[in-house]
Every structure is written in C-alpha cells, then in structure tokens.
Image (cartoon, grey):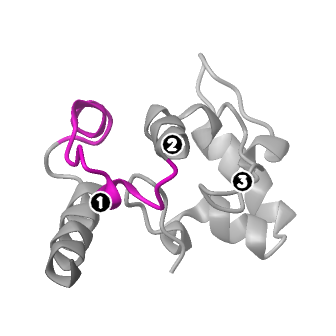
Amino acid sequence: MELAYCGLNCNECPVYTASISKNTEKQIILAKEYSTDICKFSSDDMFCLGCHSDTLSDKMCGGCEIRKCGIEKSIGNCAKCSDFPCSILEKNLGANSDSLYNLKQLAARYRKTE
C-alpha cells in the first residue's frame, strides 16, 4: 500500500491510479471533474506517482502543507512524527477524516513495536 504523509491510501486516489495505469482518458475526465470556476485543471495536472515522488502538480498535492512538513522531517508518514497529531493535520484533515483514522491506527502500531 502506498501511503501519503497525511494517511491517504494512494491506491484509493483516482489521480494516482490513473497515473500508474497511464490512463490518459481518465486523467482528462478527472481534470474536468476537479475543475471549478476558480481553478481549472488540465490532464497534465492529474499526474501523481504518490506523495513521496517528485511528480506532483502544485495545483494538486505538490503544494500540500502536510507533505512539505513530512519532507522536512524526513518521515514516511505523519504517524511516525513525534508531534503527531499536530495542528497542521487538524487544520487540513479535520477530526473525523479517514486519513487521520489511518494515521492513528498506524501510530498505535508503531508505539507497540517500540
């Protein structure tokens, strides 16, 4: 399982799955679905090989505050961070997100193995 810093299972992300399967048709559809009057996406913006890669569009997760923090701290995901859970996660994920739940489960496992 490819896990983003924020706890998102990349295998459940349509942008990631379209990218790894090289499904340009799906990337075009996703660009249309994700576009708003304020922010327009192209199919090129719908390319991601996971949070730990350097292939992310700044319009998507490339500019993510959680990702930037994880890179700075050189951790695989936020559950491994000594500051977990933090205000950055709370601000960006919310208290009841699936991603935060994933991270809490991982943090509990990490504590048991220490």
**Residue 78, above or below 102:** above
Residue at label 3?
29
Amino acid under label 1? Answer: Ala
Q: Where is the C terminus found, in terms of image quarters? A: bottom left
- Point out the tag, 3 or 2, that comes first from the N-terminus: 3
Disc 3 to disc 2, C-alpha distance:
25 Å
Disc 1 to disc 3, C-alpha distance:
33 Å
Within 10 Å of disc 3 (Cα), the crowding (few <14, some 14-19, many 20+) is: few
Q: Please tell me which residue is depicted at 73% across the width and 39% down the height of the picture.
A: 57
State the image coordinates of residue 82 (x, y, percent, origin top left).
Answer: 25, 50
- Point out the tag, 1 or 2, that comes first from the N-terminus: 2
Residue at label 1?
79
Q: Please tell me which residue is depicted at 76% across the width and 41% down the height of the picture.
A: 45
Amino acid under label 3? Answer: Ile
Element class at badge 1:
helix
Amino acid under label 2? Answer: Arg
The quarter of the displayed image where residue 27 is located: bottom right
In-image side of 12 versus 34 (left or right)? left
Residue at label 2?
67
Range of the magenta residues?
A: 74-94
The quarter of the displayed image where residue 22 is located: bottom right
